[in-house]
Image (tube, grey):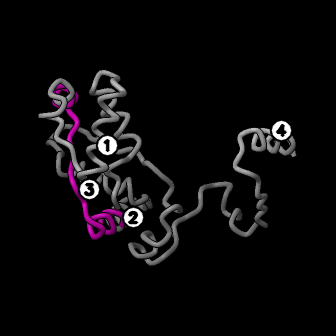
């Protein structure tokens, strides 16, 4: 799972640069071209803010994700998604005795059907109220790639 260009990470970097859009754009361009950027050398003030923030990071593998999903399911009867599993896996590496850690769910497990099936051998539960959603008929309406056409479509169909 490559989330190196995740929008929430970009927002974090934007805040660390002092809300400098040009600096953030430059970092993202470097990331796109080289697969990385070095905040320490390119934006030393931003790097200082990162250090002050207490933000930490880590890496987890697909196997780590699956094991974390299984572990939380077995211990707490809680099915988590793959992104949350990454957070829990990495968070556990930074646990300190006597210091509670909270890990917030980042997505619905049902969005990651293949990984949940692989981890647990069963599909992810559907969110309450959406259990039958997939069995309902699907409606598709093609419209032109035009903002005004989209606005008209929304106006005509919003209250149906």
Tag 1's secondary structure? Answer: helix
Numbered label attached to residue 95: none
Q: Quarter holding the N terminus? A: bottom left
Give the foreground label among 2 and 3. 3
**Residue at 82% over, 40% down:** 152
Q: Which residue is mark 3?
A: 89
| Distance from the alpha carbon under mark 2 to that under mark 3 | 14 Å
Q: CA distance from mark 3 to mark 4?
A: 45 Å
* Residue found at x 39% / y 60%: 82
> Looking at the image, do the residues carrying marks 2 and 4 touch, with CB atoms under 8 Å apart?
no
Residue 34 lies left or right of residue 110; in this view the side is left
Q: Which mark is residue 73?
A: 2
* Viewer-proximal residue among 2 and 65: 2
Point out which mark residue 155 bears.
Answer: 4
Examine the structure image and report whether residue 64 is included in the region drawn in magenta. yes
Q: Is residue 73 above or below residue 119?
A: above
Q: Is residue 82 above or below residue 14?
A: below
Q: Residues within 10 Å of mark 4 (few under 14, many from 20)?
A: few
Residue 83 position, x and y percent, is 38, 55
Specify which label sits upstream in the sequence, 1 or 4.
1
Mark 3 touching mark 1, by CB under 8 A?
no
Residue 112 percent coordinates (x, y): 48, 64
């Amino acid at each position: 799972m490559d989330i190196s260009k995740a929008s929430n990470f970009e927002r974090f970097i934007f805040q660390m640069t002092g809300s400098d859009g040009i600096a953030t754009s430059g970092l993202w361009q470097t990331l796109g071209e080289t697969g990385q950027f070095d905040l320490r050398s390119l934006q030393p003030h931003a790097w200082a803010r990162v250090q002050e923030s207490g933000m930490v990071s880590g890496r987890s593998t697909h196997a780590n994700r699956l094991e974390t999903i299984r572990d939380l399911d077995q211990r707490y009867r809680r099915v988590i998604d793959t992104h949350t599993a990454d957070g829990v896996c990495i968070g556990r590496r930074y646990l300190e005795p006597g210091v509670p850690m909270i890990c917030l769910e980042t997505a619905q497990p049902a969005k990651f059907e293949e990984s949940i099936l692989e981890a647990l051998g069963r599909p992810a539960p559907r969110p309450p109220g959406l259990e039958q959603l997939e069995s309902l008929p699907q409606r598709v309406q093609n419209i032109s790639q035009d903002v005004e056409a989209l606005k008209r479509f929304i106006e005509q169909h919003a209250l149906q």
